[in-house]
Image (cartoon, rainbow, N blue to C red):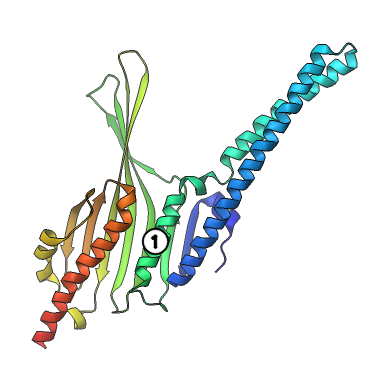
Amino acid sequence: MAIDAEKLRTTGVYEAQAPLESVLADIAEIDKAERQYAQVRKAKVRHGFLSLGIGVLGILLAVFAEAGALVLVGVLMALSGVACAVILWVAAYRYGRNLTTYRWRFELLGRLAESLQQDGDPKAPVKVSLGLKDRARLLKEEIWPARPRGKQRFSEDDWLSIQGRFLDGAEFSETVYELIRRRTYVNPRGKSKTKYRSRHFIGLRLACPQELYGDLRPLEEGLKKNLRLPASATVRGVKVGEKAVFLKVRVAEAAELIQANVMMLLGLYRALNLARQMQGRQK
């Protein structure tokens, strides 16, 4: 399925309901579009410098011309040249900037799709929603008493959700969101300062066929104790029902999101293989 690059640039949201192979093809198109937008931005910057050069020539003409008409022409050249330069530079900064800023997000989705493709059902479509712009919503704002005129704001950006099915019939749904804390205060010199902290959270739910794995509830304690994760990741929640497992993990370093995801799935299936053996013995 071909993507609408211009719509993606303006909305900053990629959505699809297709097999993982098609999602990977879309990611390749997004990557191509981002590189093209980067080239357009560079061209706008160059044209801005050309316009500024025309403005400088206009200033020189207005200063050194003797005839009044030439002075007027010089002033018009200077004004139009500088104005065009500013407009082009602002446009260059904004054009497709979201795709560049959040390149790491669609690259991460591509790596995630590749890892899921190994055990995912190739015929079953996955449902994907990926945010490629700042969509953070304010959770709360309060006084930060530790610093003079201190305030802190907490916001949340739900930027990825993906749902699909594995070859064994288990259905997975995953969400990734970013929790952002911004603290502002005034230092002893009277200058305003801002401190920024970001943490990512992965919520993974796996609904398993009961005839294959049986009752999953005995797995809860083992998952809490034995789930291995990268250095910056910590388990924030484990819930196991009769047919489904839910894991919540906090990841401090965005670079470890993929590794954390893979290790979560490996830990889950290590426990599920045990449940499958127990179910086989009972049968």
Q: Is residue 222 left or right of residue 178?
A: left
Question: Quick check: can you spot residue 245?
Answer: no
Question: Quick check: can you spot residue 62?
Answer: yes
Q: Is residue 246 left or right of residue 40?
A: left
Q: Nearer the viewer, residue 156 or 124?
A: 124
Q: Position of residue 243 (x, y in %)?
A: 20, 73
Disc 1 marks which amino acid?
Arg
Q: Where is residue 154 in the image (x, y as percent from the top left)?
A: 31, 38
- Residue drawn at x 30%, y 14% as measured from the top left: 188
Q: Which of 212 and 135 is in front in this view?
A: 212
Q: Position of residue 43 (x, y in %)?
A: 66, 42
Q: Is residue 129 above or below residue 275?
A: above
Q: Is residue 42 left or right of residue 269?
A: right
Q: Is residue 212 left or right of residue 14?
A: left
- Residue drawn at x 23%, y 48% as measured from the top left: 232
| Tag 1 residue | 111
Q: In this view, does 36 lie above or below 45?
A: below
Quadrant of residue 115 within the rendered picture: bottom left
Quadrant of residue 176 within the rendered picture: bottom left
Q: How crowded is mark 1: few (under 14 residues within 10 Å), some or many (20 or more)?
A: some
Quarter of the figure that contains the C terminus: bottom left
Quarter of the figure that contains the N terminus: bottom right
Q: In the rendered picture of this protein, how many numbered marks are placed on residues?
A: 1
Quadrant of residue 87 within the rendered picture: top right
Q: Where is residue 118 in the image (x, y as percent from the top left)?
A: 35, 73
- Residue drawn at x 58%, y 60% as measured from the top left: 4
Q: Mark 1: which secondary structure?
A: helix
* Residue furthest out toward the bottom: 283
- Residue drawn at x 50%, y 51% as measured from the top left: 12
